[in-house]
Image (cartoon, helix red, strand yellow):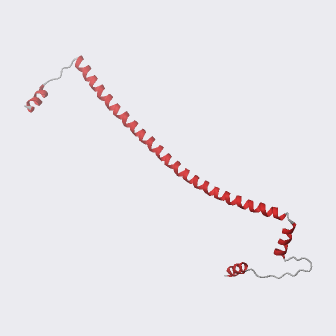
Amino acid sequence: MKKTQKQSTEKVTAIDNDYVRSMQKKEYLKKAQKIRLRNRLAVFAVIVCIVAGSLFNMNEGQKELLAVKEQEKLEAMATLKDLQAQQEQLNMQLTMLDDDEYIAKLARKEYFLSESNEIIFSIPDKKKESEKEMRKE
């Protein structure tokens, strides 16, 4: 039965009038419109994927940059604390240098200066000796 239908459709001639041509034209336009819609949707899908991928990539890059900056900030804060402690120590030493007794004591210790009727004995320091030995090696 299928063979007879195929044979019968092959033998049937198409009607060639205005109505049939307009219907064929409408069908062709619908098919072309569907194809254009699919193409537009495919292009938009590709654009959305590219934009989403680039946003994701940019977000990851910014996360890494933020982590690096946070680490640098922590290091800078540690350095700042060290420098502040050193600043306090230097300020204390500066105030101590205003004291005449401290200056006299420091001069006696570092430069072996003495007061009248005073004898200075130099005792070698163990730390300085070990540093000298290490430098020689």
Please identify the quadrant where the C terminus is shown.
Answer: bottom right
Name the residue nearer the viewer: 28 or 77: 77
Q: Residue 109's spot in the image, x, y percent?
A: 82, 75
Residue that sits furthest to the top in the current view: 18
Residue in the picture at 9% in, 32% down? 2
Name the residue nearer the viewer: 123 or 64: 123
Q: Residue 20's spot in the image, x, y percent?
A: 22, 20
Is residue 19 rendered to the left or right of residue 102? left
Q: In which quarter of the image is residue 6?
A: top left
Name the residue nearer the viewer: 54 or 25: 54
Residue in the picture at 74% in, 60% down? 88
Residue in the picture at 17% in, 23% down? 14
Is residue 103 rendered to the left or right of residue 28? right
Is residue 20 rendered to the left or right of residue 64? left
Q: Residue 60's spot in the image, x, y percent?
A: 49, 49
Q: Residue 96's spot in the image, x, y percent?
A: 82, 64
Name the residue nearer the viewer: 95 or 2: 95
Please identify the quadrant where the N terminus is shown.
Answer: top left
Residue in the picture at 84% in, 77% down? 112
Residue that sits furthest to the right in the current view: 116
